[in-house]
Amino acid sequence: MRIGIFLVLGTVCLGSTAAHAITRSCSMHYELEFTEGYGWLTGQKIGTGSFIAKGGCGRTVPNRCRRRARNLGLKCMAAHWKSPKKLPAECRSKKIAKISKALSTVGPKEIATIEAVDFGVFVHSAKLKKSRLSTSDLSKFVRDKKLKANVWAVSAGNTGCSKRVMLAENFPVSMNALKKAKYSVTLKKAPTIKYKKAKHQGLRLTQTRTVKVGRKKLVPTTQTGVFLEASGTRFLSAESKDRKYHGCGRKAAQNFLRAVGVEVSQVYVGNRMSLNSVLGKKVWNGNKAVVPRELEKGIRRVLVAQGLPKKPFNLIRFRRVTYPQNHIEKQIIKGKSPVIALVNDGNHWVVATGAWSPVFDRKTAFRRFMTHDNGRNSWWSWNKYNLKFGAAQTAVIPTAGGVYKPGTMVFIK
Protein backbone atom coordinates (compact mmCIF):
# COMPACT_ATOMS: atom_id res chain seq x y z
CA MET A 1 0.00 0.00 0.00
CA ARG A 2 2.83 2.41 0.88
CA ILE A 3 4.56 1.63 -2.39
CA GLY A 4 1.37 2.43 -4.33
CA ILE A 5 0.95 5.78 -2.56
CA PHE A 6 4.58 6.68 -3.23
CA LEU A 7 4.21 5.87 -6.95
CA VAL A 8 1.04 7.96 -7.27
CA LEU A 9 2.60 10.95 -5.48
CA GLY A 10 5.76 10.61 -7.57
CA THR A 11 3.74 10.60 -10.77
CA VAL A 12 1.81 13.73 -9.70
CA CYS A 13 5.03 15.58 -8.83
CA LEU A 14 6.75 14.67 -12.12
CA GLY A 15 3.68 15.65 -14.14
CA SER A 16 3.46 18.99 -12.35
CA THR A 17 7.13 19.85 -13.07
CA ALA A 18 6.83 19.01 -16.77
CA ALA A 19 3.64 21.07 -17.16
CA HIS A 20 5.30 24.21 -15.74
CA ALA A 21 8.39 24.12 -17.99
CA ILE A 22 8.46 27.08 -20.43
CA THR A 23 10.95 28.64 -22.86
CA ARG A 24 11.63 32.33 -23.48
CA SER A 25 14.06 33.96 -25.87
CA CYS A 26 16.24 37.06 -26.30
CA SER A 27 17.44 38.69 -29.50
CA MET A 28 21.24 38.87 -29.74
CA HIS A 29 23.42 40.97 -32.03
CA TYR A 30 26.85 42.54 -32.41
CA GLU A 31 26.92 46.33 -32.17
CA LEU A 32 29.51 48.69 -33.62
CA GLU A 33 29.89 52.10 -32.01
CA PHE A 34 31.96 54.27 -34.37
CA THR A 35 34.57 56.17 -32.36
CA GLU A 36 36.98 57.66 -34.89
CA GLY A 37 37.09 58.56 -38.58
CA TYR A 38 33.36 58.70 -39.39
CA GLY A 39 32.83 62.45 -39.74
CA TRP A 40 29.49 63.79 -38.50
CA LEU A 41 28.27 60.21 -37.92
CA THR A 42 31.04 59.43 -35.42
CA GLY A 43 29.35 58.13 -32.28
CA GLN A 44 26.55 56.38 -34.16
CA LYS A 45 25.82 52.70 -33.48
CA ILE A 46 24.80 49.95 -35.87
CA GLY A 47 23.76 46.34 -35.32
CA THR A 48 24.65 43.24 -37.30
CA GLY A 49 25.04 39.47 -36.96
CA SER A 50 21.78 38.85 -35.11
CA PHE A 51 20.55 35.49 -33.78
CA ILE A 52 18.24 34.09 -31.08
CA ALA A 53 19.13 32.65 -27.66
CA LYS A 54 16.60 30.60 -25.66
CA GLY A 55 16.28 29.73 -22.00
CA GLY A 56 14.00 27.40 -20.05
CA CYS A 57 12.50 27.73 -16.55
CA GLY A 58 9.37 27.22 -14.49
CA ARG A 59 6.12 28.69 -15.75
CA THR A 60 5.86 31.26 -12.96
CA VAL A 61 9.33 32.81 -13.50
CA PRO A 62 9.59 33.75 -17.22
CA ASN A 63 12.18 36.45 -16.53
CA ARG A 64 14.50 33.74 -15.25
CA CYS A 65 14.19 32.08 -18.66
CA ARG A 66 15.22 35.33 -20.35
CA ARG A 67 18.19 35.86 -18.06
CA ARG A 68 19.38 32.35 -18.87
CA ALA A 69 18.88 33.00 -22.58
CA ARG A 70 20.71 36.33 -22.32
CA ASN A 71 23.68 34.80 -20.50
CA LEU A 72 23.87 31.90 -22.95
CA GLY A 73 23.82 34.26 -25.93
CA LEU A 74 26.44 36.62 -24.49
CA LYS A 75 28.68 33.68 -23.63
CA CYS A 76 28.39 32.46 -27.23
CA MET A 77 29.31 35.89 -28.62
CA ALA A 78 32.31 36.34 -26.31
CA ALA A 79 33.66 32.91 -27.23
CA HIS A 80 33.11 33.49 -30.97
CA TRP A 81 34.82 36.89 -30.87
CA LYS A 82 37.80 35.35 -29.06
CA SER A 83 38.05 32.40 -31.49
CA PRO A 84 36.41 33.57 -34.74
CA LYS A 85 37.78 30.93 -37.12
CA LYS A 86 35.00 28.47 -36.35
CA LEU A 87 31.72 28.40 -34.48
CA PRO A 88 32.61 27.58 -30.84
CA ALA A 89 30.87 24.96 -28.72
CA GLU A 90 29.10 27.74 -26.79
CA CYS A 91 27.23 28.65 -30.01
CA ARG A 92 26.32 25.11 -31.03
CA SER A 93 23.75 24.55 -28.29
CA LYS A 94 20.20 23.69 -29.32
CA LYS A 95 19.19 26.83 -27.43
CA ILE A 96 21.08 29.02 -29.91
CA ALA A 97 19.04 29.54 -33.08
CA LYS A 98 19.11 31.42 -36.41
CA ILE A 99 22.86 31.99 -36.58
CA SER A 100 23.45 33.15 -40.14
CA LYS A 101 25.61 31.34 -42.66
CA ALA A 102 27.85 34.41 -42.82
CA LEU A 103 28.43 34.48 -39.07
CA SER A 104 29.23 30.77 -38.88
CA THR A 105 31.45 30.92 -42.01
CA VAL A 106 33.66 33.97 -41.50
CA GLY A 107 33.08 34.86 -37.84
CA PRO A 108 32.23 38.12 -36.08
CA LYS A 109 35.59 39.89 -36.58
CA GLU A 110 35.40 39.74 -40.36
CA ILE A 111 31.75 40.81 -40.27
CA ALA A 112 32.58 43.73 -37.94
CA THR A 113 35.48 44.75 -40.18
CA ILE A 114 33.38 44.79 -43.35
CA GLU A 115 30.53 46.66 -41.67
CA ALA A 116 32.97 49.25 -40.30
CA VAL A 117 34.68 49.73 -43.67
CA ASP A 118 31.36 49.87 -45.52
CA PHE A 119 29.94 52.50 -43.18
CA GLY A 120 33.12 54.53 -43.57
CA VAL A 121 32.82 54.35 -47.36
CA PHE A 122 29.19 55.50 -47.08
CA VAL A 123 30.14 58.49 -44.91
CA HIS A 124 32.99 59.62 -47.18
CA SER A 125 31.67 58.31 -50.52
CA ALA A 126 30.84 61.71 -52.04
CA LYS A 127 34.51 62.72 -51.95
CA LEU A 128 35.94 59.43 -53.21
CA LYS A 129 37.13 59.73 -56.81
CA LYS A 130 37.05 56.09 -57.92
CA SER A 131 33.81 54.32 -58.80
CA ARG A 132 35.11 50.85 -57.98
CA LEU A 133 37.28 50.40 -54.91
CA SER A 134 39.77 47.53 -55.03
CA THR A 135 41.13 45.81 -51.94
CA SER A 136 44.23 48.01 -52.07
CA ASP A 137 42.04 51.13 -52.46
CA LEU A 138 40.00 50.10 -49.42
CA SER A 139 43.14 49.35 -47.41
CA LYS A 140 44.51 52.82 -48.16
CA PHE A 141 41.13 54.41 -47.39
CA VAL A 142 40.96 52.70 -43.98
CA ARG A 143 44.53 53.70 -43.11
CA ASP A 144 43.97 57.32 -44.14
CA LYS A 145 40.73 57.69 -42.19
CA LYS A 146 42.03 55.72 -39.16
CA LEU A 147 38.67 54.07 -38.63
CA LYS A 148 37.97 52.71 -35.15
CA ALA A 149 34.92 51.29 -33.39
CA ASN A 150 33.88 49.84 -30.07
CA VAL A 151 32.37 46.38 -30.49
CA TRP A 152 29.62 45.19 -28.15
CA ALA A 153 27.71 41.97 -27.58
CA VAL A 154 24.09 43.02 -27.12
CA SER A 155 21.07 41.19 -25.78
CA ALA A 156 17.62 42.74 -26.27
CA GLY A 157 14.01 41.80 -25.64
CA ASN A 158 11.55 41.73 -22.77
CA THR A 159 12.39 42.01 -19.06
CA GLY A 160 15.53 40.05 -18.24
CA CYS A 161 17.05 40.26 -21.73
CA SER A 162 18.68 43.70 -21.88
CA LYS A 163 22.45 43.77 -21.44
CA ARG A 164 25.53 45.01 -23.31
CA VAL A 165 29.04 43.62 -22.89
CA MET A 166 32.06 45.23 -24.57
CA LEU A 167 34.10 42.84 -26.71
CA ALA A 168 36.66 45.32 -28.02
CA GLU A 169 37.42 48.98 -27.27
CA ASN A 170 38.53 51.18 -30.17
CA PHE A 171 38.82 48.13 -32.43
CA PRO A 172 41.29 49.22 -35.16
CA VAL A 173 39.62 48.57 -38.50
CA SER A 174 41.96 46.89 -41.01
CA MET A 175 41.41 45.05 -44.27
CA ASN A 176 44.10 42.61 -43.07
CA ALA A 177 41.46 41.10 -40.77
CA LEU A 178 39.69 39.60 -43.81
CA LYS A 179 40.98 36.03 -44.12
CA LYS A 180 38.01 34.33 -45.81
CA ALA A 181 35.65 37.07 -46.98
CA LYS A 182 36.28 39.33 -49.97
CA TYR A 183 34.43 42.65 -49.80
CA SER A 184 33.99 44.88 -52.85
CA VAL A 185 32.08 48.10 -53.35
CA THR A 186 31.12 50.22 -56.36
CA LEU A 187 29.96 53.84 -56.25
CA LYS A 188 27.78 55.47 -58.90
CA LYS A 189 26.94 59.15 -59.13
CA ALA A 190 24.15 59.92 -61.57
CA PRO A 191 21.47 62.57 -62.14
CA THR A 192 17.98 61.40 -61.27
CA ILE A 193 16.13 64.04 -63.32
CA LYS A 194 17.51 65.10 -66.70
CA TYR A 195 16.38 68.62 -67.53
CA LYS A 196 18.83 71.21 -68.83
CA LYS A 197 17.03 74.27 -67.43
CA ALA A 198 17.31 73.02 -63.85
CA LYS A 199 20.28 74.41 -61.92
CA HIS A 200 21.12 70.89 -60.94
CA GLN A 201 19.34 67.76 -61.99
CA GLY A 202 19.02 65.78 -58.79
CA LEU A 203 22.24 63.93 -58.09
CA ARG A 204 22.28 60.62 -56.23
CA LEU A 205 25.13 58.40 -55.11
CA THR A 206 24.41 54.66 -55.02
CA GLN A 207 26.72 52.29 -53.12
CA THR A 208 26.61 48.61 -54.16
CA ARG A 209 28.15 46.08 -51.76
CA THR A 210 29.21 42.50 -52.52
CA VAL A 211 30.79 39.92 -50.20
CA LYS A 212 32.16 36.60 -51.46
CA VAL A 213 33.94 33.59 -50.08
CA GLY A 214 35.80 32.09 -53.00
CA ARG A 215 33.54 32.61 -56.00
CA LYS A 216 30.25 32.37 -54.14
CA LYS A 217 28.32 35.26 -52.65
CA LEU A 218 28.17 35.05 -48.87
CA VAL A 219 25.19 37.41 -48.66
CA PRO A 220 22.96 38.97 -51.34
CA THR A 221 24.31 42.10 -53.03
CA THR A 222 22.66 45.18 -51.50
CA GLN A 223 22.62 48.94 -52.10
CA THR A 224 22.51 52.17 -50.15
CA GLY A 225 21.62 55.55 -51.62
CA VAL A 226 22.00 59.21 -50.74
CA PHE A 227 21.28 62.49 -52.53
CA LEU A 228 24.16 64.93 -53.11
CA GLU A 229 24.71 68.65 -53.37
CA ALA A 230 25.14 70.10 -56.89
CA SER A 231 28.95 69.86 -56.54
CA GLY A 232 28.68 66.10 -56.11
CA THR A 233 31.30 66.21 -53.36
CA ARG A 234 29.06 66.21 -50.27
CA PHE A 235 25.71 64.94 -49.07
CA LEU A 236 22.66 67.12 -49.63
CA SER A 237 22.35 69.11 -46.40
CA ALA A 238 19.32 70.62 -44.75
CA GLU A 239 19.05 74.35 -45.41
CA SER A 240 20.23 75.92 -42.12
CA LYS A 241 20.54 79.68 -42.77
CA ASP A 242 16.86 80.49 -43.30
CA ARG A 243 16.06 79.87 -39.63
CA LYS A 244 12.81 81.67 -38.88
CA TYR A 245 10.02 79.17 -38.25
CA HIS A 246 7.33 79.22 -40.94
CA GLY A 247 6.09 75.68 -40.29
CA CYS A 248 7.75 72.28 -40.72
CA GLY A 249 5.81 71.65 -43.95
CA ARG A 250 7.20 74.76 -45.62
CA LYS A 251 10.71 73.98 -44.38
CA ALA A 252 10.42 70.38 -45.63
CA ALA A 253 9.34 71.71 -49.04
CA GLN A 254 12.32 74.09 -49.10
CA ASN A 255 14.72 71.24 -48.27
CA PHE A 256 13.06 68.94 -50.82
CA LEU A 257 13.25 71.50 -53.63
CA ARG A 258 17.00 71.91 -53.12
CA ALA A 259 17.43 68.31 -54.33
CA VAL A 260 16.24 69.38 -57.80
CA GLY A 261 18.19 72.62 -57.89
CA VAL A 262 15.46 75.00 -56.72
CA GLU A 263 16.93 77.35 -54.11
CA VAL A 264 14.13 79.47 -52.64
CA SER A 265 13.32 80.97 -49.24
CA GLN A 266 10.65 79.76 -46.84
CA VAL A 267 8.76 82.99 -47.50
CA TYR A 268 8.79 82.21 -51.23
CA VAL A 269 7.42 78.73 -50.48
CA GLY A 270 4.92 80.09 -47.96
CA ASN A 271 3.45 82.54 -50.49
CA ARG A 272 2.51 79.52 -52.58
CA MET A 273 1.61 77.07 -49.80
CA SER A 274 -1.45 77.64 -47.61
CA LEU A 275 -1.47 76.77 -43.94
CA ASN A 276 -4.17 74.39 -42.74
CA SER A 277 -7.75 75.51 -43.23
CA VAL A 278 -9.67 72.23 -43.52
CA LEU A 279 -9.36 71.61 -39.77
CA GLY A 280 -10.44 75.13 -38.93
CA LYS A 281 -7.11 76.18 -37.39
CA LYS A 282 -3.72 77.18 -38.77
CA VAL A 283 -1.83 76.06 -35.69
CA TRP A 284 -1.93 72.37 -34.78
CA ASN A 285 -0.32 71.18 -31.52
CA GLY A 286 1.71 74.40 -31.41
CA ASN A 287 2.97 74.05 -35.01
CA LYS A 288 2.05 75.97 -38.14
CA ALA A 289 0.24 73.18 -39.92
CA VAL A 290 0.21 72.24 -43.61
CA VAL A 291 -2.05 69.37 -44.65
CA PRO A 292 -0.78 66.94 -47.33
CA ARG A 293 -2.90 68.37 -50.15
CA GLU A 294 -1.65 71.92 -49.57
CA LEU A 295 1.95 70.69 -49.30
CA GLU A 296 1.67 69.01 -52.69
CA LYS A 297 -0.07 72.01 -54.28
CA GLY A 298 2.48 74.43 -52.86
CA ILE A 299 5.45 72.52 -54.26
CA ARG A 300 3.74 72.29 -57.65
CA ARG A 301 3.24 76.07 -57.66
CA VAL A 302 6.93 76.61 -56.87
CA LEU A 303 7.99 74.28 -59.69
CA VAL A 304 5.72 76.09 -62.15
CA ALA A 305 6.96 79.50 -60.97
CA GLN A 306 10.53 78.28 -61.55
CA GLY A 307 9.66 77.23 -65.10
CA LEU A 308 9.93 73.50 -64.44
CA PRO A 309 7.33 71.39 -66.30
CA LYS A 310 5.23 68.52 -64.97
CA LYS A 311 7.41 66.16 -66.96
CA PRO A 312 9.96 65.16 -65.78
CA PHE A 313 8.98 66.85 -62.47
CA ASN A 314 5.96 64.62 -61.88
CA LEU A 315 5.19 65.31 -58.22
CA ILE A 316 2.85 62.84 -56.52
CA ARG A 317 1.23 62.46 -53.11
CA PHE A 318 1.28 58.81 -52.11
CA ARG A 319 0.03 56.74 -49.17
CA ARG A 320 1.42 53.51 -47.76
CA VAL A 321 0.34 52.49 -44.25
CA THR A 322 1.88 48.99 -44.19
CA TYR A 323 5.69 49.16 -44.02
CA PRO A 324 6.02 52.58 -45.68
CA GLN A 325 9.75 52.44 -44.93
CA ASN A 326 10.25 49.88 -47.71
CA HIS A 327 8.76 52.29 -50.22
CA ILE A 328 10.80 55.23 -48.91
CA GLU A 329 14.02 53.20 -49.05
CA LYS A 330 13.30 52.05 -52.60
CA GLN A 331 12.46 55.58 -53.73
CA ILE A 332 15.73 56.96 -52.33
CA ILE A 333 17.86 54.23 -53.93
CA LYS A 334 16.09 53.98 -57.30
CA GLY A 335 13.65 56.91 -57.60
CA LYS A 336 14.01 60.51 -58.79
CA SER A 337 13.93 62.48 -55.56
CA PRO A 338 14.09 62.40 -51.76
CA VAL A 339 10.85 61.69 -49.91
CA ILE A 340 8.83 64.11 -47.79
CA ALA A 341 7.09 62.11 -45.05
CA LEU A 342 4.44 62.87 -42.41
CA VAL A 343 5.91 61.51 -39.16
CA ASN A 344 5.56 61.79 -35.36
CA ASP A 345 1.91 60.68 -35.21
CA GLY A 346 0.97 63.02 -38.07
CA ASN A 347 2.44 66.11 -36.34
CA HIS A 348 5.61 66.74 -38.34
CA TRP A 349 7.04 66.87 -41.88
CA VAL A 350 10.61 65.72 -42.63
CA VAL A 351 12.60 64.80 -45.74
CA ALA A 352 14.35 61.43 -46.13
CA THR A 353 17.44 62.01 -48.31
CA GLY A 354 19.48 58.85 -47.71
CA ALA A 355 18.96 55.16 -46.87
CA TRP A 356 21.53 52.82 -45.33
CA SER A 357 21.47 49.22 -44.08
CA PRO A 358 24.14 46.80 -42.80
CA VAL A 359 25.83 44.50 -45.30
CA PHE A 360 25.10 41.32 -43.33
CA ASP A 361 21.78 41.95 -41.61
CA ARG A 362 18.59 43.39 -43.14
CA LYS A 363 16.77 43.47 -39.82
CA THR A 364 14.67 46.65 -39.79
CA ALA A 365 15.96 47.63 -36.33
CA PHE A 366 19.39 48.15 -37.89
CA ARG A 367 18.41 50.18 -40.98
CA ARG A 368 18.66 53.99 -41.04
CA PHE A 369 17.49 57.08 -42.94
CA MET A 370 19.41 60.30 -43.44
CA THR A 371 16.85 62.95 -42.59
CA HIS A 372 16.36 66.69 -42.96
CA ASP A 373 14.46 67.68 -39.83
CA ASN A 374 13.76 71.38 -40.29
CA GLY A 375 17.27 72.88 -40.46
CA ARG A 376 19.10 69.85 -39.03
CA ASN A 377 20.78 66.85 -40.62
CA SER A 378 19.68 63.83 -38.60
CA TRP A 379 20.19 60.06 -38.60
CA TRP A 380 16.80 58.41 -38.02
CA SER A 381 15.85 54.86 -37.14
CA TRP A 382 13.55 52.77 -39.32
CA ASN A 383 10.72 52.91 -36.80
CA LYS A 384 10.55 56.71 -36.84
CA TYR A 385 9.19 56.41 -40.37
CA ASN A 386 6.22 54.19 -39.49
CA LEU A 387 3.93 57.10 -40.58
CA LYS A 388 1.19 56.13 -38.12
CA PHE A 389 -1.24 58.61 -36.56
CA GLY A 390 -1.85 59.19 -32.88
CA ALA A 391 -5.35 59.07 -31.39
CA ALA A 392 -5.93 62.84 -31.68
CA GLN A 393 -4.89 62.88 -35.33
CA THR A 394 -6.99 59.83 -36.20
CA ALA A 395 -10.03 61.52 -34.66
CA VAL A 396 -9.86 64.47 -37.08
CA ILE A 397 -9.48 62.44 -40.29
CA PRO A 398 -13.23 62.69 -41.13
CA THR A 399 -13.19 66.45 -40.53
CA ALA A 400 -10.28 66.86 -42.94
CA GLY A 401 -12.29 65.41 -45.80
CA GLY A 402 -9.75 62.86 -46.95
CA VAL A 403 -6.71 65.17 -47.28
CA TYR A 404 -5.06 64.33 -43.94
CA LYS A 405 -4.28 60.64 -43.49
CA PRO A 406 -1.53 58.39 -42.10
CA GLY A 407 1.10 56.92 -44.40
CA THR A 408 1.47 60.11 -46.45
CA MET A 409 4.59 60.85 -48.47
CA VAL A 410 5.39 63.21 -51.37
CA PHE A 411 8.07 62.68 -54.04
CA ILE A 412 8.81 63.00 -57.75
CA LYS A 413 7.95 59.92 -59.76
Image (cartoon, grey):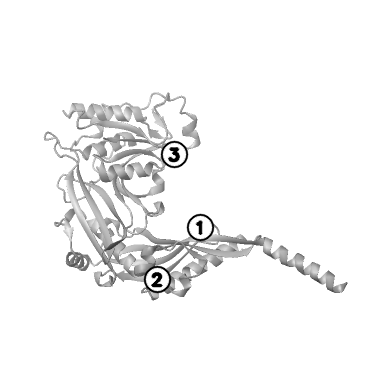
Vertical placement of 5 versus 230: above or below? below
Residue type marked 3: Lys
| Residue count near mark 2 (Cα–Cα under 10 Å), binned few <14, some 14–19, many ≥20 | some
SS class, disc 2: strand
User: Of callouts 2 and 3, which one flags the residue occurring earlier in the amino acid sequence?
Assistant: 2
Residue 287 image position (x, y, % from top left): 39, 35
Q: CA distance from mark 2 to mark 3?
A: 37 Å
Residue occupying image coordinates x 14% and y 56%: 129
User: Of callouts 1 and 2, which one flags the residue occurring earlier in the amino acid sequence?
Assistant: 1
Residue type marked 2: Leu
Q: Which residue in the protein does label 1 denote?
A: 157
Residue 79 seen in the figure:
yes
Residue 266 image position (x, y, % from top left): 26, 34
Residue 48 image position (x, y, % from top left): 38, 60
Residue 381 image position (x, y, % from top left): 38, 50
SS class, disc 1: loop
Q: CA distance from mark 1 to mark 2?
A: 20 Å
Q: Nearer the viewer, residue 84 or 365?
A: 84
Residue type marked 1: Gly
| Residue count near mark 3 (Cα–Cα under 10 Å), binned few <14, some 14–19, many ≥20 | many
Check contact, mark 1 vs mark 2: CB within 8 A.
Answer: no
Residue occupying image coordinates x 38% and y 66%: 103
Q: Which residue in the protein does label 3 denote?
A: 388
SS class, disc 3: loop
Vertical placement of 77 versus 297: above or below? below
Mark on residue 119? none
Q: CA distance from mark 3 to mark 1?
A: 23 Å
Mark on residue 167? 2
Residue occupying image coordinates x 24% and y 31%: 314
Q: Nearer the viewer, residue 115 or 383?
A: 115
Instruction: Tell me: 232 left or right of 214.
Output: left
Total labels: the figure holds 3
